[in-house]
Image (cartoon, rainbow, N blue to C red):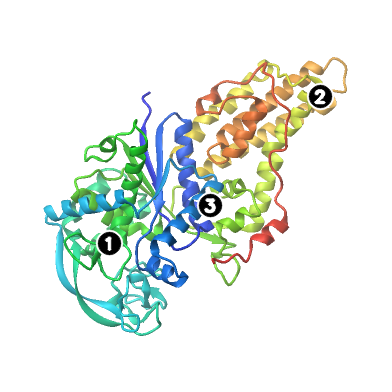
Amino acid sequence: MTPRKILITAALPYANGDIHLGHMIEHIQTDIWVRFQKMMGNDAIFVCASDCHGTPIMLKAEEQGISPEALVTKMRERHIKDFKDFLIEFDNYYTTHSEESRQLTELIYEKLKTHGDIIRKIIKQTYDPIKDMFLPDRYVKGECPRCGAPDQYGDNCEKCGATYTPTELKNPKSVVSGTTPVQKESEHYFFDLPKYEHILKKWLHEKKHVQDAIAHKLEEWFTQGLKEWDISRDAPYFGFEIPDAPGKYFYVWLDAPIGYISSFKNLCDKRSDLNFKEYWNKNSQVELYHFIGKDILYFHTLFWPAILMGADLRTPDGVFVHGFLTVNGEKMSKSRGTFIMARKYLDHLNPEYFRYYIASKLGNHIEDVDLNLEDFKLKVNADLVGKVVNIASRCSSFIQKYFDQKLSSIETERELFNNFSQKGEDIAQFYEQREYSQAIREIMLLADWANQYINEKKPWLLIKEKNQEKNVQDICTVGLNLFRLLILYLKPVLPNLAQKTEIFLNIPPLIWEDHQKPLENDTINVFEPMIERIEQKQLDAIMGAVEI
């Protein structure tokens, strides 16, 4: 079969703070899917970038006494290191504060203007008279105008999901100064989103671009009626100035998703084998998928595809939405010590523990994922240490001590191997459908089966009997072949453990089709410890980590 061409993105982390474990859910989910596609032989490309514009960046830089450019450069470098150490393997990780982003944003804006999609009008905005600045949506807090929930941001309610403008909030307060904002008039530029309502509905329903729960949510928004979208902001603002409007800047949520395109454009400039137009032209046959959190659903399933349509560019084939991370059943909290930064975790624990645990809970749904620390410790220790790696440890000791590192054949257990091999088709489907928890469940059932086989054969007793050496070699060869299949199936989740296994078994990097053939009559290397148990003191050490 011809390999699929797939472009994959994860949401762009905002460059005013460090990466925390909540960010990692999405990037791990995406990375697993990309690694699986590459193991299948598909041409999968994973791009991302730091989201670098907006008032929060400007204010954070002011607070630190540095320029916004210096801040976003520093944060991007820290993001890259955190992602790398969590084994997230981007093909390109760029920045929205780039010349490629500027050019593409201006080009898309000009296309929208040409199509009559940009509307100019005078509006009233919340204004902080103490800071002498217009306030972006998230710098105003108050009571939700629909349900009355307190302490809600100026763009949407986290409790009831309503969307609104900051001027609609009840009892609003400026997040910057704490004062009650006033309303002030200013001319702004709007994208005519209602114009695209019919074509957006068609885009959503003619092909399954989102999960069912998301489709239902979008129907609610269509029923309420789409609104024109304000794509401009007044100075002072850190971002790209609108070419024909001095003192007006593109709203960060216009140029942020364009960062997907600019990151890919930057990659094209580095690689001669990539054709930018093939991936982004209106009739592109390349698959395009976005992985995002449910908090940015509106932007990615309404604004973004409509902007792409208006700019005569291709739209996504799928927008995959996930829930938030909770810790011990509750929202991450600095006061409770459960707001865990990625770097704090990495200082004390193997990143593959978290990758595995999160994979064991992730499915194709938008429910929140809970990190229960006691369950985390028990599951990793039982599954990875007690079930999977233990097979290699048990079998390799006999191969090393009695058979000079040489495997035999698996003729006596060909059917057992074939049963394990055939499960590869089901597991591949689970990965493809992003049902990782089902893949992990299937793999662990196989691990139980492999351990049961070794326990029943008892090579530690057979080796003491006369003329049973060949039988022991065969049993351990089968055991190591089953271990190899388990690691192959886990490789998208546990790439480091897979690499250690490839070195131990003296084999090339595992690809998915390898599940069809056993390892026989080969010489393996000496087994080295691959993974350690989680200790309670390590969990204690990561608690209490708060953002600096």
Of the residues under marks 1 and 2, which one precedes in the sequence?
1
On the image, the x and y values in percent for residue 5 come to: 35, 33
Give the quadrant of the N terminus. top left
- Amino acid carrying label 2: it is Lys
Q: Quadrant of residue 488?
A: top right
Q: Is there a contact, CB below 8 Å, between mark 1 and mark 3?
A: no
Where residue 302 sits in the image (x, y, percent)? 27, 56
Which residue is the site of mark 3? 82
Residue at 52% in and 28% down: 511
Within-10-Å neighbours for mark 1: few <14, some 14–19, many 20+ = some
Residue placed under numbered mark 2 in the picture: 401
Measured Cα–Cα span from mark 1 to mark 3? 36 Å
Report the mark closest to the observer, 1 or 3: 3
What's the distance in space between the residues labelled 2 and 3, CA to CA? 41 Å
Which dot, 1 or 2, sits closer to the camera? 2
Considering the numbered disc 3 on the image, is that residue within a helix, a strand or a loop? Answer: helix
Between residues 49 and 141, which one lies in front from this camera angle? 49
- How far apart in space, not on screen, are marks 1 and 2 (Cα)? 67 Å
Element assignment for label 1: helix
Rendered image: mark on residue 221: 1
